[in-house]
Image (cartoon, rainbow, N blue to C red):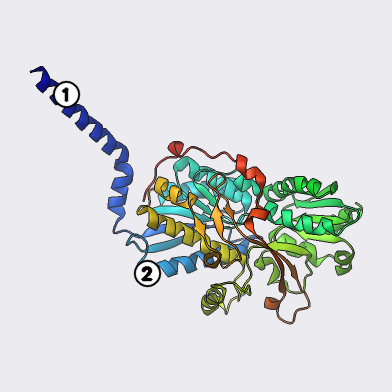
Amino acid sequence: MRTTGTKSEALIRGLLLACLALAVLAPPLAAQAQAQNQPLIIAHVAPTTGRFALHAEADRRGVEMAIEEYNARGGVLGRELVLISRDPSLEPEQAAKVAGELIEHTDAAFLIGAISSGVAASMSAVCQEKGMIFINTNSSAPSESLENAHRSKFVFDAHGANINRALLKYALAKQDSKRVLLLSEDDLFGRSNAEAMKPYIAEYGGQVVGEVLAPEDMPDPKALLRQVAQIPADVVAVSISGDNQIKLFSQIDPAVLERQAWIVGEVDWEELYPAPGTPRPLFGTTWAWHLDTPGTVAFVDRYRQRYGHTRLAYPGDVTHAAYLATKALLEAITRAGSTDNHAVIAQLEAYRASAAERMQHAPAWMDPVSHHLQQSVYIARWNPRSTRPELGLEILGHVPPEEARLEQEAQTRLEPLAETPRLAR
């Protein structure tokens, strides 16, 4: 009788444990089963008004191209992909509210976009709290992969520290005197990039002799340029983005750029193509429409068939980054066989892409510690006298990811996966 009782108790304990396991797994499994015949909704969040409006449009086009490509093959996990768009504004508090509303009051399964680093930081904090995966396609503040990194966020743009590491080495090597002036936006993007540059300036024998902060709205670039002119410097390192960059360089005498080394951590196509006559110093980018890399011609052709009649008649680095970031997400869902965020996070952390898949000159990989994509960057310049704006971008060199990597990312601390809420839609 004692043996029978022991077996019965063991059976009951086993059944209880099985029920407990099902209870833990029930929410994602139930959501998956219920959603099998429902569209898979992806929310694109980027500021459609203000100084990043054109960037947001370019970003959305990249997301659209990836989604259309997958829908033509039957969607993902047998589900049609549906893209919805929301404007988070450029105010972090409003952006956090928009992210919360998308998570709580829509069936969106993933958030993708950002552009502004401050907006990305705000939205991704809400996403982490709720377990929503956030794909940051195009924000370039180093803080996105350092203090503002999250387990549920993946950053697919190169940031200013990656590009400035190469640019500063190049610029300072050509100077006998190595005085550096930092000209930065007074926001998360500008301050984060300025701080990330300082160790590289010291490493390459330079000295920071001054810092000038530009207000986000930049009402008068001439006043800023007068401040810059009053500080003797050999190199001016600029961290100014969006339309502010166009306003700034439209007021600079090209002769200044010839006698003084100016560098810009990153210049997006959306800041070049609409202002072809505006001079630019050396800058960095992650891709150009005329790179001699596998897949580039076909991608450009697809883009121009769809958008060749618009203001941005050629694709740039923003569209390229958004397209590949969206593909990375959809591939991760496919490999996971599920929209369960824990399973998809694991696949995104293991993301690897060949040079051909990236349309770049070297393979790229997702850093599992910082959740920041390590990829190629290019040193470039702009020819304002080009007869056609699409021919103004000139690529001078390629920097492989291992030479552009920000070392501090090795110390990034993400929330444990076990403490990230489960979510599947």
In the rendered view, would you say 162 is above or below 249? above
For this rendering, which residue is in front, 375 or 58? Answer: 375
361 with respect to 34 (left or right):
right
For this rendering, which residue is in front, 387 or 146? Answer: 146
Q: Residue at x 70, y 78 (%)?
A: 391
Q: Nearer the viewer, mark 2 or mark 1?
A: 1
Identify the residue under disc 1: 9
Secondary element type, mark 2: loop
Residue 368 x %, y %: 53, 46
Mark drawn on residue 73? 2
Residue kind at label 1, given as amino acid type: Glu
Location of residue 307 by image quarter: bottom right
Q: On the rendered image, what quadrant is the N terminus found in? A: top left
Secondary element type, mark 1: helix
The answer, for residue 219, to whether it is visible in the render is no
Q: Residue at x 42, y 40 (%)?
A: 421
For this rendering, which residue is in front, 21 or 268? Answer: 21
Q: How many marks?
A: 2
Residue 42 x %, y %: 44, 58
Q: Which badge, 2 or 1, comes first in the chain's sequence?
A: 1
